[in-house]
Image: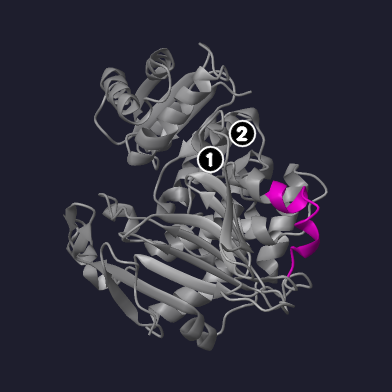
Amino acid sequence: MIDRLAIFGATGDLSARYLLPGLAAMRAAGHLDDRFQLVCSDRSDWDSERFRSWATAQLERHGDAWPADARKAIAASARFRRADVTDPAAVASAIAGEGPLAVYLVLPPALFSRAVSTLDQAGLPAGSRIVLEKPFGEDLGSAVELNRLLAEVVAEDAVFRVDHFLAMTTVENVLGARLANRMLEPIWNSAHIAEVEIVWDEHLALEGRAGYYDNAGALKDMVQNHLLQLLCLVAMEPPISLGERDLRDRKVDVLRSVRPLTDEDVVHRTRRARYRAGRIDDHEVPAYVDEQGVDPDRRTETFAEVELELDSWRWSGTRFRLRSGKALGRDRKEVTVRFRPVPYVPFGHSGEVLPNVLRFGLEPESLTLDLTGTGSRARTFAPLALTARMATPGLPPYGRLLLDVLTGNPALSIRGDEAEESWRVVEPVLSAWSRDLVPLQDYPAGSDGPSRE
């Protein structure tokens, strides 16, 4: 296990909300001890004392679920080095020390290639690992080039293209439900499943992230990575094992089976929109174009929906709908599997017999099965929902992710060819949207999203 972690871009929101609390959770669970060293860098004119003070405050704010002594130990383990990731000398100073380390790049995608080259010039120690936050590249061409650069610096199994969705217990929930249950495994195919909807709708608006989000948008921020990863878990063939090669091979197979979208497909099977001023709960939300740091001319979408089909024996005829939106009236974060209706109900009844629906709640994590049961009167039907709350995992998603990085387990990270295939899926959408083949709708903040026109 590597006991040194270097974070470049360390004073940002990701570190504050997720990485530092994830490390505190690992410390509380006994995965980290006093040998652990945290090296934090960015271009801020800070010193170690100021960073530790900032880290302490962020851990109190975002990591209060973990014991105070664990939070204190993580803050105390940190040292800060001012460094520009394009300056080999500054980076060499930041990563100096004995033995390998894990380097976590919390940077805009446009800086990934330069940062990887700089790490190589700075003399990255043998056995080190490189961690990259999504999105991996900005398009297919940049992803291919970044993969080439990474291959010159470290081995593929030392590259962690992370997606914290894969560190949720949703991975076990989805795979366990479909592969370890006799009643589900035989019907997990297009003969029985009409549609799978993968949704990440949130009431949060921009929340000060214009610097990143306005250059990405909902399609790149959520669909190209997070939601396609969930698609892979739902649709992949049963792997021989959950080991690195078997699991990732089957995920790549799914992405390769996605039917390429033509311009006409994009027009009829995708939607994009951005929020205008509205009200969410008890506060007013300005229009996206009026948020600080937003360039209205970019026409960045805050809502994206894409309908895909898979060319495979198992899934021919099943629709897969991927959707994500910001500033909506309610959080809806789930994978919904809609089964086909029974072909015939052999006795008279009143009331509608609804198709069965299986829902995997993502946040909070839950499992719900919608059935049809008997109503209060004879020969009537009524909906019946069976719901289970998932056990709280020992580590939060970023804690599990960091544990995999430090122990060298890449099974839940994204392999290079998988990242490229994900871009292949969405590039026709990006191209058509850039040519305005699909109108940019709008929707009031706090609503259910854009209307279907």
* Residue at 39%, 50% in the rendered image: 108
Q: Amino acid at mark 2?
A: Asp
Residue range corresponding to the magenta coloring:
175-189
- Picture quarter with the N terminus: top right
* Residue at 19%, 65% in the rendered image: 277
243 on left or right of 398 = right
Q: Are marks 1 and 2 in contact (CB under 8 Å)?
A: no
Farthest residue to the front: give it.
378
| Most foreground residue, 350 or 129 | 350
Circle 1: is it few (<14), some (14-19), or many (20+) Cα within 10 Å?
Answer: many
The answer to which of marks 1 and 2 sits earlier in the sequence is 1
In this rendering, the answer to whether 186 lies above or below 41 is below
Residue 446 visible, this angle: yes
| Most foreground residue, 78 or 452 | 452
- Picture quarter with the C terminus: bottom left
**Number of numbered discs:** 2
Numbered label attached to residue 404: 2
Residue 163 visible, this angle: no
